[in-house]
Image (cartoon, helix red, strand yellow):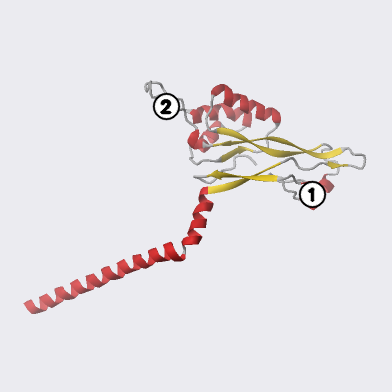
């Protein structure tokens, strides 16, 4: 019986060795596939996941009637965004007993009334991580000024503005179907705004931002 037991053990050992060789070979071939064959594609994918481009433009061109009276005009206004990772006070190394503020909670409580949203919803966004999240696009000048004052007076970290073009239609509903309208990205979507988009839109510059999480839209 012993010779047969020895042969069974030898077969099991051989089978185990073969399995290990197959596994190692599979891992090795997978590494070659990822690091050689797919290297360029993965490099571009990684870059697109970590960086994003934000297009910043000058005011969109006016639309006037035959008498030269403005019917559609744009001004540059502030768009508010947050960098949640930076929303904290710098630690005082000399006095470590100093109680650090909860900047995210304070920011949410102070900004919610101005932005007309729920403070808890804002706080959830601020604590969700990431490096770039829109809070409100193309704010009214008065509203933007209120937010800027709150940020300055309370030394709130991680809250910033970018300039964007905001469209106003001076005649309200008059000729609305003819004039059309634009989207948040300042691109014409219907009417003359769409037909003349190439000549009405302002010049643009592109800024790059580091993103650690996908940007969230709180307001349209």
Is residue 185 visible to the viewer in this orientation of the structure? no
Q: Farthest residue in the right direction? A: 67
Label 2 neighbour load within 10 Å: few <14, some 14-19, many 20+: few
- In the image: residue 115, left or right of residue 34: right
- In the image: residue 211, left or right of residue 25: right
- In the image: residue 14, left or right of residue 163: left
Q: Distance of mark 1 from mark 2, alpha carbons? A: 51 Å
Residue 16 lies in quadrant: bottom left
Quadrant location of the N terminus in the rendered image: bottom left
Quadrant location of the C terminus in the rendered image: top right
Q: Position of residue 116 (x, y in %)?
A: 63, 31
Q: Which mark is residue 91?
A: 2
Viewer-nearest residue: 33 or 144: 33
Label 1 neighbour load within 10 Å: few <14, some 14-19, many 20+: few
Q: Position of residue 133 (x, y in %)?
A: 56, 40
Element marked by disc 1: helix
User: Which comes sooner in the sequence, label 1 or label 2?
Assistant: 2
Q: Report the residue marked by disc 1.
A: 199
- Relative to 33, say whether 3 is above or below: below
Q: Position of residue 147 (x, y in %)?
A: 62, 28
Is residue 202 visible to the viewer in this orientation of the structure? yes
Viewer-nearest residue: 140 or 75: 75
Residue drawn at x 55%, y 34% as measured from the top left: 122
Viewer-nearest residue: 5 or 28: 28
Residue drawn at x 74%, y 50% as measured from the top left: 189
Residue 139 lies in quadrant: top right
- In the image: residue 19, left or right of residue 121: left
Element marked by disc 2: loop
- Relative to 163, say whether 12 is above or below: below
- Pointers 1 and 2 in contact (CB under 8 A)? no
Q: Position of residue 128 (x, y in %)?
A: 49, 40
Residue drawn at x 41%, y 24% as measured from the top left: 92
């Amino acid at each position: 019986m012993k010779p047969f037991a020895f042969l069974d053990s030898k077969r099991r050992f051989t089978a185990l060795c073969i399995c290990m060789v197959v596994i190692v070979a599979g891992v090795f071939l997978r590494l070659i596939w990822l690091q050689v064959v797919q290297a360029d594609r993965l490099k571009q994918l990684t870059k697109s996941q970590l960086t994003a481009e934000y297009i910043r433009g000058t005011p969109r061109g006016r639309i006037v009637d035959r008498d030269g009276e403005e019917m559609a005009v744009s001004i540059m206004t502030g768009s508010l965004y947050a960098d949640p990772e930076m929303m904290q006070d710098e630690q005082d190394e000399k006095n470590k007993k100093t109680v650090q503020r909860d900047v995210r909670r304070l920011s949410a409580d102070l900004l919610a009334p101005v932005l007309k949203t729920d403070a808890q919803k804002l706080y959830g966004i601020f604590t969700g991580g990431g490096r770039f999240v829109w809070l409100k696009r193309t704010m009214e000048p008065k509203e933007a000024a209120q937010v800027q004052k709150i940020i300055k007076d309370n030394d709130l970290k991680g809250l910033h503005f970018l300039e964007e073009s905001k469209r106003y239609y001076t005649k309200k509903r008059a000729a609305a179907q003819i004039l059309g309208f634009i989207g948040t990205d300042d691109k014409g979507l219907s009417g003359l705004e769409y037909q003349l988009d190439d000549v009405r839109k302002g010049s643009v510059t592109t800024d790059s931002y580091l993103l650690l999480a996908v940007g969230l839209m709180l307001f349209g």
